Image (tube, rainbow, N blue to C red):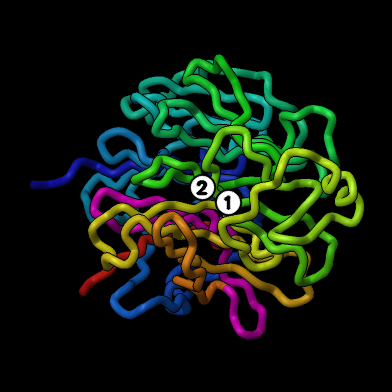
């Protein structure tokens, strides 16, 4: 049976669903040839010429935001612009036929978008009550297994202790924007999260603060096991690094800080993450975490620029290691910066790259 057309939604700078920084681009085919991964895995070009590709989301009937594969060959055929002149609309999510877009202080909704790619509707404002700060204002959004929309709010600074508790948090709201609550505190800047396929617990990446040196602090993979937990920012970083400005204040607080499930590399800039649940990859990947490490920008020797795999056993991390690398060359030349991952219905994985303007597809053959 021929599968239904695949449509991919992302956000493009000054267009639809891509964001990021523009740099000179390598030929995507040459980039693919440089990627290194375990035996049996292959990288392919799903789409190219998609500048600043960021968050990916899968819609109804195999729809992935605004990029269509109509003939089933897992290569993009058409790109549709859904919205323009929005402010940093980097977060996207799909729910019951509608596309939700996070644009700093606003959450917008485009109804029946799958049937209206060529003539998108005017967006409905779900809420416009989030902070307007541009610093860490980009949103990664997604619907959880509880049916609520999860929306992080980054710290409006590198390191500070804002008066408003909504900063440095992860929130959730109803699909209509009501009943906002904070589910996690002390989260400096999360740009990727997913829910454990068995426990439904929220796991998320968090970008560590800058200017404590090349090797401090680590970025983090965190596990929210109870609503209201505090993950340390701005008082404590990683497992045991007290902030030089806010650490003493943090030591006096009664609320305990939840340690990261895994310390990631310092300044690797972890963004999108997924629990892999498909059947294409080997069994050792089932229900394990894949993370897109965007790469360091303020480190004397670059680090990151790769996909890593975090393995769990009984809910605890047992390993953290590279899965796909090669975007960072030995001479520190950067060929790409992975941003987000998306599992397709056949079990293959898409990876967005906001430097080369490419979406890769990763497959596995035994």
Q: Position of residue 169 (x, y in %)?
A: 67, 36
Viewer can see residue 85: no
Assess disc 1: are there few (<14), some (14-19) or many (≥20) residues with their C-alpha within 10 Å of its C-alpha.
many
Q: Position of residue 157 (x, y in %)?
A: 82, 44
Q: Which residue in the structure is indicated by mark 1?
A: 222
Residue at screen point 78% across, 71% down: 214
Residue 186 located left or right of residue 79: right
Residue at screen point 83% across, 34% down: 162
By secondary structure, the bulk of the magenta-drawn segment is best described as loop
Q: Which residue in the structure is indicated by mark 2?
A: 203
Under circle 1, the secondary element is strand
Quarter of the image where the C terminus is located: bottom left
Residue closer to the observer: 56 or 191: 191
Q: Residue furthest bottom?
A: 330
Residue closer to the observer: 265 or 280: 265
Assess disc 2: are there few (<14), some (14-19) or many (≥20) residues with their C-alpha within 10 Å of its C-alpha.
many
Q: Position of residue 272 (x, y in %)?
A: 52, 52
Residue 180 located left or right of residue 116: right
- Which residues fall within the magenta stretch? 328-355
Relative to residue 261, is residue 105 depicted above or below?
above
Q: Position of residue 134 (x, y in %)?
A: 75, 37
Question: Which numbered disc flags the more N-terminal residue, 2 or 1?
Answer: 2
Residue at screen point 40% across, 40% down: 200
Q: Tell me the CA gap for discs 2 and 1.
A: 6 Å
Q: Are marks 2 and 1 in contact (CB under 8 Å)?
A: yes
């Amino acid at each position: 049976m021929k599968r239904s057309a695949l449509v991919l939604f992302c956000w493009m700078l000054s267009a639809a669903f891509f964001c990021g920084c523009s740099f000179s681009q390598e030929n995507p085919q040459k980039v693919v040839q440089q990627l290194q991964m375990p035996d049996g895995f292959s990288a392919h070009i799903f789409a190219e010429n998609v500048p600043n590709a960021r968050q990916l989301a899968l819609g109804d009937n195999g729809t992935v935001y605004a990029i269509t594969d109509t003939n089933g060959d897992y290569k993009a055929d058409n790109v549709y612009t859904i919205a323009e002149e929005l402010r940093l609309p980097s977060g996207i999510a799909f729910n019951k036929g509608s596309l939700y877009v996070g644009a700093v202080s606003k959450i917008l909704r485009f109804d029946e978008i799958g049937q209206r790619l060529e003539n998108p509707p005017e967006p409905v404002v779900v809420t416009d009550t989030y902070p307007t700060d541009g610093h860490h204002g980009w949103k990664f959004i997604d619907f959880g297994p509880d049916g609520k929309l999860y929306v992080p709010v980054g710290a409006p600074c590198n390191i500070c202790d804002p008066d408003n508790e909504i900063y440095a948090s992860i929130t959730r709201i109803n699909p209509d924007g009501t009943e906002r609550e904070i589910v996690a505190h002390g989260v400096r800047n999360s740009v990727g999260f997913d829910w454990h396929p068995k426990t439904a617990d929220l796991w998320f990446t968090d970008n560590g603060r800058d200017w404590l040196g090349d090797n401090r602090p680590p970025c983090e993979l965190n596990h929210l096991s109870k609503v209201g937990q505090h993950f340390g920012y701005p008082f404590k970083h990683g497992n045991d690094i007290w902030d030089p400005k806010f650490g003493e204040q943090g030591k006096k607080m009664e609320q305990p800080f939840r340690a990261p499930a895994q310390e990631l590399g310092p300044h690797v800039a972890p963004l999108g993450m997924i629990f892999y649940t498909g059947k294409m990859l080997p069994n050792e990947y089932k229900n394990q975490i894949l993370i897109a490490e965007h790469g360091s920008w303020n480190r004397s020797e670059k680090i990151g620029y790769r996909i890593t795999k975090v393995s769990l056993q009984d809910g605890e991390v047992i390993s953290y290691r590279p899965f796909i690398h090669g975007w960072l060359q030995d001479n520190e030349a950067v060929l790409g910066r992975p941003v987000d991952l998306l599992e397709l219905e056949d079990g293959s994985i898409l990876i967005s790259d906001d430097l080369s303007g490419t979406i890769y597809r990763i497959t596995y053959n035994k």
